[in-house]
Amino acid sequence: MPKSIPFIKPKFPAPEDLAKDLKRIYENNFYSNNGPVYFEFKEKLEAYLGQGLHAVIVSNATMGLMLAIEAIMGEQKNKKKYIAIPAFTFAAGPLAIRWCGFEPLFFDVDPVSAQPDLKSFQKVLDVYSDELAGVLLINDFGIGNGEVDEWDELLTSKNIPYIIDSAPGFGSTYENGEFIGGRGACEVFSFHATKPFGIGEGGLITTKDADLADRLEILKNFGFDDSKRTVGAGTNAKITELDCAIGLRILAKYPETLTDRRKTYARFEDNLKSQNITFLPRAATAAIQFATIVVPPKYQQMLIDKLKVGGVEARTYYAPAVHTFPYFSDAPKVDLSNTELLSQKVISLPVHPDMDPVTVDYICDIIIKNLEKA
Ligand SMILES: Cc1ncc(COP(=O)(O)O)c(C=O)c1O
């Protein structure tokens, strides 16, 4: 058994294949600025996701979130102060909110699904309704939120725009079987090396709204119009041709990648049947960045330590929760008891490409044996 099982193990296209891509890019003599490889990647992503979605590929998901907030909520900047966001998330969300001139307003997640909690959001509405510019929801762990229809109904009826941070969820599905990506004003994915669809650095915004996609393209390119004059807000969030070529190679094998990751995840679920362990609902339909288990708080650190002794790197996504970070400690919040408790219960276990079942069993044995002893 390997003595070192890292948390993340990306699988990159082979160097000899990338050499072919580089040759093609060299011959095109086009390295960025939405060149031919960009458009090929964009069309294939749109075909893969279906649903008439428009794909805007960007340099990373954090920039994607910033562009989306600016495009969808930017006009309300000097009128409404807050964008509500679950505290059980990655720092990129609240950072993007502040970068865009708003203040994050933290609400809670459901204690079982870890997804944004409708009841907690009602508390936001009770107090902050008049000052709410929008909501940045999250499909936590890239799992399609089982209550997405309820969220849509509520926010649409109140005319509150929302974006979904689906960073690790490219390839995950909602309950109706559709790929995540088509809800809210837009959804944002990360193609960071740590994600199931990992190309190094990259991100994707998907939307059904063609005008919004056009606005996002302008925002990502210095606010330029067709004659290269800045006509509004903008930045540089473009992606290079080489990154798009890597993305094309990852996409070509993605159905197999998902099958492989879900098979590994299923083995974790089968092996870890214990009254002290629960799994997140609908996790098996996600793209599976890692395997999340939920244990009683008294076992969280003990198990992480024992795994470390066995050479296994485990982490605690998304704990500590973002509202505890120094930079966000002064941001307003409603009761976050579920987030606080979940933060003490989650353990994220490594899921690698082509993971040997023996490795999964080894990790699970450490957990089961130490729970039995505890
Ligand atoms: C939920 C979530 N949102 C956003 C991001 C940021 O993605 P990127 O690294 O592509 O900017 C991450 C990355 O880990 C994430 O997990």
Image (cartoon, rainbow, N blue to C red):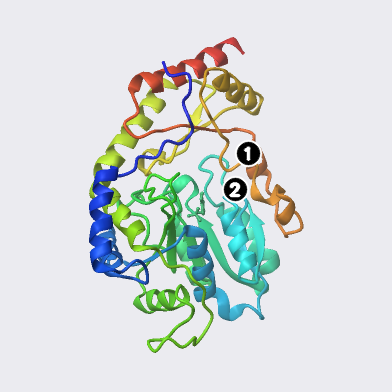
Helix, strand or loop under label 1: helix
Where residue 37 sits, quadrant-wise, is: bottom left
Helix, strand or loop under label 2: loop
Residue 47 appears in the rendering: no
Mark 2 neighbour class, 10 Å CA radius: few under 14, some 14 to 19, many 20 or more: many
Q: Residue furthest top?
A: 373
- In this view, the residue in front, 91 or 268, is 91
Q: Earlier in the sequence, mark 1 or mark 2?
A: 2
Amino acid under label 1?
Ser
Q: CA distance from mark 1 to mark 2?
A: 8 Å
**At which x and y percent is residue 247?**
32, 54
The answer to whether residue 107 is left or right of residue 54 is right
Tally the marks: 2
- In this view, the residue in front, 223 or 273, is 223
The answer to whether residue 294 is left or right of residue 43 is right
Q: Tags 1 and 2 in contact by the CB under 8 Å rule?
A: yes
Mark 1 neighbour class, 10 Å CA radius: few under 14, some 14 to 19, many 20 or more: many
Where residue 97 sits, quadrant-wise, is: bottom right
In the image, which disc is placed on residue 329? none
Amino acid under label 2?
Phe
Image quarter (top left, top right, bottom left or bottom right) of the N terminus? top left
**At which x and y percent is residue 56?**
37, 67
Q: Residue at x 27, y 46 (%)?
A: 254
Q: Residue at x 38, y 32 (%)?
A: 265
Residue that numbered label 1 is attached to: 343
Residue that numbered label 2 is attached to: 88
Q: Residue at x 62, y 59 (%)?
A: 94
The answer to whether residue 81 is left or right of residue 27 is right
**At which x and y percent is residue 295?**
57, 28
